[in-house]
Structures are given as C-alpha cells and as structure tokens.
Image (cartoon, helix red, strand yellow):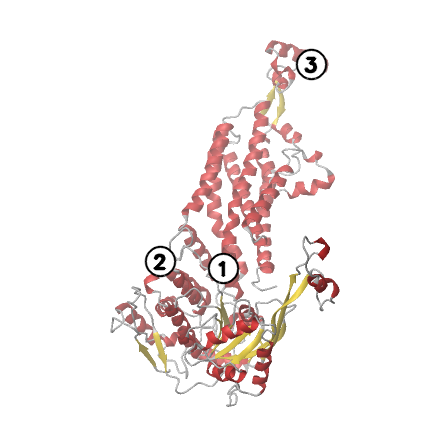
Amino acid sequence: MSPIVAQNVSSNNDSPTPYFQHSLELIAGEFSTATAPSSTLGQLLQHVGDTRKEATGDQTSVHELLVDISDPRPIQFVLSFNNLTYSVKVPRKMALPSFFRWSGGSATADAAVIGNPLAAGDSYFTRTKMLLNDISGEARDGEILAVLGASGSGKSTLIDALANRIAKGSFKGNVTLNGEALESRMLKVISAYVMQDDLLFPMLTVEETLTFAAEFRLPRTSSKSKKKMRVQVLIDQLGLRNAAKTIIGDEGHRGVSGGERRRVSIGIDIIHDPIILFLDEPTSGLDSTSAFMVVKVLQRIAQSGSIVVMSIHQPSYRILGLLDRLIFLSRGQTVYSGSPTNLPLYFSEFGHPIPENENKTEFALDLIRELEGSPGGTKSLVEFNKSWQSMKHTRDSDPDQLGLSLKEAICASISRGKLVPGATNDINSSSMVPTFANPFWKEMVVLSKRSILNSKRMPELFGIRLAAVLVTGSILATVFWQLDNSPKGVQERLGFFAFAMSTTYYTCADALPVFLQERYIFMRETAYNAYRRLSYVISNALVALPGLIFLSFAFAMATFWAVGLDGGLSGFLFYFLIMFASFWSGSSFVTFLSGVVPHVMLGYTIVVAILAYFLLFSGFFINRDRVPGYWIWFHYLSLVKYPYEAVLRNEFENPSKCLVRGIQIFDNSPLGEIPSAMKVRLLQSVSKSLGVRISRSTCMTTGLDILKQEGITDLSKWNCLLITVAWGFLFRILFYFSLLLGCKNKRS
C-alpha cells in the first residue's frame, strides 16, 4: 500500500479525537492485506489528521492527505472522446416587415428570414443552435480533467455528453474507454455523476443521507459495520463531523449550510469509489477554502485510480494547481486543450502573453470573453488551437503506458479494492460487474425505511390529511344525521354516497406533490443504478398503505353509525373495505399522474378535471341507461362508479328491508301535502282499481327496487370491490412504466 502522511493545516489539536482514532484503527485493520501498488479512496482515508479551522469559528474537521506517488502506477484507464457534436432546435425570432413598424428601420432582420436561404435542418420558425462543435480530448485515471468557460459555453453539455446523459439524435461523435465503446449499462455501474443542484431529502440528517447512499451503492458483500465505518470516514473526510446529526433542511426547516449541503451531495456519489466520476461545477456556492478542500478530495480520488471529469467556472490559483488537464470552451468550441502549465506558452504564441502576477485562468477567460464580443469572435483562437494541437505542443512525449483491455483494467481495479457496486474479486466471473449492488428485496427495505423516516419527521403532512378526512366526515355526519327509511331518506342516502365517494378521491389529490418532490432525486439515483425502478414503485405503494388504512377507518367510523347506514357490523366492515379500496385506487391514480405530469399546478388541474368527469359518469347524476352511447365507455372507466355501486348494494341489497310503505308513495309529489286521511282514501281507490289490497303499511318499494331504478344490476358488491382494488394495481403498473419511459434523466 502506498505510504500516506497526515498533514494538519491550521490545527489546534496535535492528535485526532479518540473516536476518530478508533475509526482509523478499524479501517487500517480492514485494509491491512491490500497489496495493490496504489490506494483506493478507502485506503487513502486510513490515516487522517484532525484539524480545526478557527479563523471563521468553524470547528469542522478538514483533512489534507498527502500520497506518495514517487512510484507512479501504470495508466489503466483512458477515456477518449472524439468529434463530439450536439445541436438543438430553438424558436426563431420573427421580425415584423418594415411597413408594419411605427418608425423607420432597416429590413435586415426580414431579409435574414425571408431573403436568405435557410441552413440545413432549419425552418422559418426554428433554427439550429450548436451546443457542441467538434470537441475532442481525453481523460486518464490519476488525473483531473477540468472543463472551463463562461456561462453558456457548453461546459455542462460536454459533461452530460461524456456521461451518456444526452439522448441519441442530434448528438454525434464517439466516447470510448480504453479504446472500447462504453456501453450504457457498464457506464452506469463504474461511474457516478454529481449534479450541480443539491437534491436531498430534507428531513434526513447528514449521517443518515450518507448511510442510505452506502446501502444503495456499496457491495452487497460488505458487512453492515464496514458500511457504517465507510460513512464515518467519509463524514470526516468531507469536513461534516459537526453537522453529522443535523437534518439537511429546506425552506420550512432549518438545516445545514449551503456549503455543507454541497459536500453531502458530493459524498453521496463518491461513497462507492467510482472508476469514472463526473461533476457539474462541484465548487459552485462554496467559499474558496471549502472549494479547495473539495477539489483536493477529488485529486485523491483520481490518484486512487479513478478518472475525474469536472466543469468549473473560474478556479482559484490554488485549485488550478490541483488540475491536470484543461479544456476551455467558447460557444461550444474548443479554444484550448492541454495542461495548465502550458497556458503561458499557448497564449504567448497567440500574441497575448499572460502577465506574471495574474491568475492564468482568469486571464484566459477574460480574453475569451473579449474575443466573443469582437466581430470575428473566437474563430482565430479556435483555429490557433487546432494548429497548436497539430504541432504536438500539448501531447505527451512518453508513449502511452496503456496496455490493458477494458475488462482487464476493471478486474485490476476491483482487485485493488475499488468499491464498484456488487463487484467480486473473481476475475473469471461473468457477473464481475452486476447491474445493481443489492438484490430486489434489499432495495425495497432500504427505500421503505428511508421514506418512512423522512415522512415521520414531517407529521404535519399526514396530520393535515387526517384532519381533512375527519372534518369532511364530521360535516357529512351532521348534515345526514340518522337518515330514515322514507323516500326522502332514500334520496338523501344516494346523495351522501355520491358525495362521500367523490370526496375520498379528491382527498387523495394531496399525494400529487409527494413524488414530484422526489422526482429529481429518483432520476439521479436510478440514472446510475442505485436501485431498480420496480423496487421504488413497490416500496412507494407499501409505505402508503398504513396511512390509507388509517384514513379509511377514520372516515368510516365518523360516518357509518352517525348517518345510520344499514348492515350492522358486517355492513360496517364492507363499508370500511370499500373506503380503503377507494383511497387505494385514488392514491394510485394520483401517483400515476405525478409520474406523467412534472408540474404541481398542472397536475392539480388535471386531477380535479378528471375526477369531476368520473363523478359525472358514475351513475349518480344520470343512470347508465341514459348515458349517450358515445360516452358509455367513460362510464365504465369511471373510478367513482364501482365504489358508488358497491356502497349502494351494501345498503339496499337486503330484500327484507322496506323503504316505501303505503301512503309514503305520495311523498315527494304534489299529493304529499294532503291530509293522511285523504291519502288513505286514495290508496283504497287505487286498490279497487288494481284489484290489489294496499294498506298504510304495505311495502311498496324495497332496496332491490332502488337498485333497479339506479341501474345497478350487473355487478355484485364484492365484484365492485375487486375492480376498485384492481384499478389501484393498474395505476401502479402504469406509474412504473411512466418512470421507465419518462424519467431517463437525459437531454432530449
């Protein structure tokens, strides 16, 4: 193992804390058998000095690691990219003809659109914008390749292209690793991508966030204690010890600082020690000291046998000393590619020497901006860079030491201890680099645990939902208090059931932002195979079930006995089951929409509109027989139809229950106001005319008659229950396909 020296910078303590010393001893014992000529990230962290920063009052640990590289390791990985080109269609700004303008002006803009011929692929409404234009270069393990340029120069686009985050289409060129085309599956396993945005669960602590990342990304053969120790060392290495027990936080919950959030985001993706690490401006939002520490960490990762490719806006002098290769971009074109040490010679030969006391990168970026504003743009610098490359000023004088195939290099990297997810030391194994680090069931357990923990710390969300259900149930209970078995009571029961079922589905609309808040976290994690999409879908459903059961029981208890519904205990149990099935199908439907519609307000609009259509065609406002033929399909697709028919059958299917007797047939009619004696005489007259004896107590309408009047004759209540549950499963399946097809985390 390479010797490692711990160096303290501005330290107040000469020795590490007892806890950290204990951590070092455990890790040193764990890797004491390593025989590789170079160290992995885990090995580099064996001996770390504990330093303190007092200048700013920050007591966060900062670790400077010095690696002895006097005996350099032969290069094993070379990431090459050649002739990368990427263009997109953007709307064309149309100028009005001159005779429509209030004042004079030239018709140059009109001529540009009308008179001049269109470029290939352009139209009168769109034009082609070149984001990358013939970009070539290479990155080697043990080095940091930094992509620089002003905003809009194409830095992030180039990183996305190398990380296979651009959909095929207008993207052209090839990216190879050790001369072999890099398959998407292999790239996901051996690489990691650190996004520019900090996408984290707000109610998890720093330690918990990294622990869950370790569960997803570290090898399945690693024990729980080893994963825990990996997290603890990474916390110290990133300088997050004092914030380890602090929640990440969001707009409504105070948490860690912005710089600490950034370091946590980086830690999530470097915890498994990837062979290739892509970073999109990892130092953005950090002070100079924190930014230098982050790049120093990236240097150690590179020296452990990884390829590090990062974009950076404007590195400081200290950071520039850590970078090995630079690519300067200007409007998608390369204006410099080579070592930082060659920058003075390059710009000197270009005719713009860099002053001795000026930052090299600042001078280069300022010059590029100045040229971009000139009439000729940066064309002269682009052409000079091509001639510079052809004259071999920036090429290595030594021949390449690369002599391993891609498979051999990966095997050698794994044998040195690189923590490729799920990797084994069996070089002959066909599953040397499996797709996922964990089995299906383990992913479900970890995902469920994380979701429950995050939700448990925001009880107000479930509390508001429960309060809404209880308030709605209480209002319905008081409005429809103890309904009687009369024609009026029958109509009121029908209204209660229709409103109760529709309210159940509308209450589920608050599940819409749940996935939308996690959408980009999900896309980041699944982009590099942290877990399967199916695992996420099933765990999402399982975590939602206890809450749905509780809400269903609360609503059933608040309304069933107070309204005076029929059926006793068995009727209540079925009423509870159909309520649960309604919550389940409604929640699944809204979850599916959240996977299709990426915006909250648009999602709410669609949910409200579709649920209104479901209620319209449920059979309450108009019977099935009266629905126009061209709309009958919507009647059978209505989610409200089946639970509505189920509760009606549960209430009215008892054949011995009489709902209209004798003189009650005159209720809800103009004859309802006449005296009872007159109603009796009318019944006698009707009896004589029909030849049937009808008395005051004769049963005129049963529950089965009500069901026939409502057109509910096809399905039993149990069939309606099963269909409602099946709707829920169907929408969960559709949710899975929406994640499979619509959340690929790639540029279009």
**Residue nearer the viewer, 527 or 622:** 527
713 displayed left or right of 234: right
Name the secondary structure under disc 3.
helix
Q: Give whichever of discs 1 and 2 has the lower sequence position.
A: 2
Badge 1 marks a residue whose secondary structure is helix
Q: Which residue does the numbered mark 2 point to in the structure image?
A: 246
Question: Which kind of residue does numbered mark 3 sit on?
Answer: Val
Query: Residue tagged by mark 1?
Result: 521
Q: What residue do we see at 38% from left, 71% from top?
A: 293
Q: Amino acid at mark 1?
A: Ile
**Residue at the spot 34% in from the left edge and 61% down from the top edge:** 243
Front label number (1 vs 3): 1
Q: Are marks 3 and 2 in contact (CB under 8 Å)?
A: no
Label placed on residue 686: 3
In this view, the residue in front, 609 or 350, is 350
Question: Which quadrant is the C terminus positioned in?
Answer: bottom right
**Upstream in the sequence, badge 3 or badge 2?**
2
Residue 41, percent from left and from top: 40, 75
Q: Based on the displayed image, in which of its 4 quarters is residue 675 positioned?
A: top right
Q: Earlier in the sequence, mark 1 or mark 3?
A: 1
